[in-house]
Structure formats: structure tokens, C-alpha cells
Image (tube, rainbow, N blue to C red):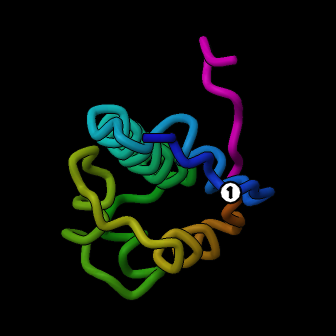
């Protein structure tokens, strides 16, 4: 039986998925956990850097302080780009998503 060669692509997300994640659920889980931690930490840093309480930021973007508390929790998995944009706008920032080479990879 011959192994079918994957079709050629220039889609960066597909290339990354093939190379680092496909067939590796443990790596996928670690990636999601790290991303959640980074988002939670960034929300906390931006809020405290602006001198705002969770309640004050919540009022600026029209949510509850409990929502902010959830978003600043590293275990929270529901971060959405729209929510991040609302937080950024309230703090006079913009959201920028970057993909950078992970340490120890080729």
C-alpha cells in the first residue's frame, strides 16, 4: 500500500497544522492552554496598566465584572476576537495577532 502524499498548499495555517498538530492531540492541548494563559495575562496587564478595576473595565465595555474575572482566568477557553477588540478599544489599543517561531523548532 502506498502512502498518499499531501496536496501542495501555500496556506500557512494548513502548513502549521500539518507540521505541528495533526495527529498530536497532546501538542494541540498544550497550544490551546498556552494561548489561553497568554490572553488572560494580557487582559490583566492591560487593565491594571490602565489603572482600572475589573468593575471599571466591565463598565467601559458593557459587561459584568464577573465576565472580566473569567477572561483573566488562564483556564477560561471562550476568548473571542470580538471581545478582545472591545477590550482593546476601551483601553485605546488595537488587537494584533502574530505568529512567531516557537523556540526549539526548525
Q: Is residue 34 magenta?
A: no
Q: Quadrant of residue 64?
A: bottom left
The vertical placement of 38 against 90, above or below, is: above
Rendered residue at 33%/34% (across/down) = 30
Q: Is residue 5 visible?
A: yes
Which quadrant does the N terminus fall into? top left
Tell me the magenta residue range: 97-106
Number of marks in picture: 1
Mark 1 secondary-structure assignment: loop
The vertical placement of 46 against 91, above or below, is: above
Is the stretch drawn in magenta largely helix, strand or loop? loop
User: Where residue 98 appears, x then y in whole percent?
Assistant: 71, 48
Q: Is residue 41 visible?
A: no
Rendered residue at 61%/66% (across/down) = 91
Which of these two is toward me, 61 or 21?
Answer: 21
Q: Which residue is mark 1?
A: 7
Toward the bottom, the furthest residue is 62
Toward the top, the furthest residue is 104
User: Where residue 87 appears, x then y in whole percent?
Assistant: 52, 70
Apparent side of residue 90 relative to residue 71 in the rendered image (left or right):
right
Toward the right, the furthest residue is 10
Rendered residue at 36%/59% (across/down) = 53
The vertical placement of 63 against 40, above or below, is: below
Apparent side of residue 18 relative to residue 57 in the rendered image (left or right):
right
Rendered residue at 70%/64% (across/down) = 93
Q: Quadrant of residue 57?
A: bottom left
Amino acid at each position: 500500500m502506498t502512502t498518499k502524499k499531501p496536496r501542495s498548499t501555500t496556506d500557512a495555517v494548513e502548513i502549521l497544522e500539518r507540521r505541528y498538530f495533526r495527529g498530536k492531540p497532546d501538542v494541540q492541548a498544550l497550544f490551546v492552554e498556552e494561548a489561553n494563559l497568554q490572553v488572560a495575562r494580557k487582559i490583566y496587564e492591560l487593565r491594571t496598566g490602565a489603572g482600572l478595576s475589573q468593575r471599571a473595565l466591565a463598565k467601559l465595555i458593557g459587561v459584568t465584572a464577573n465576565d472580566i474575572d473569567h477572561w483573566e482566568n488562564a483556564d477560561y477557553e471562550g476568548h473571542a476576537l470580538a471581545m478582545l477588540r472591545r477590550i482593546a478599544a476601551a483601553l485605546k489599543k488595537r488587537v494584533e495577532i502574530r505568529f512567531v517561531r516557537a523556540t526549539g523548532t526548525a
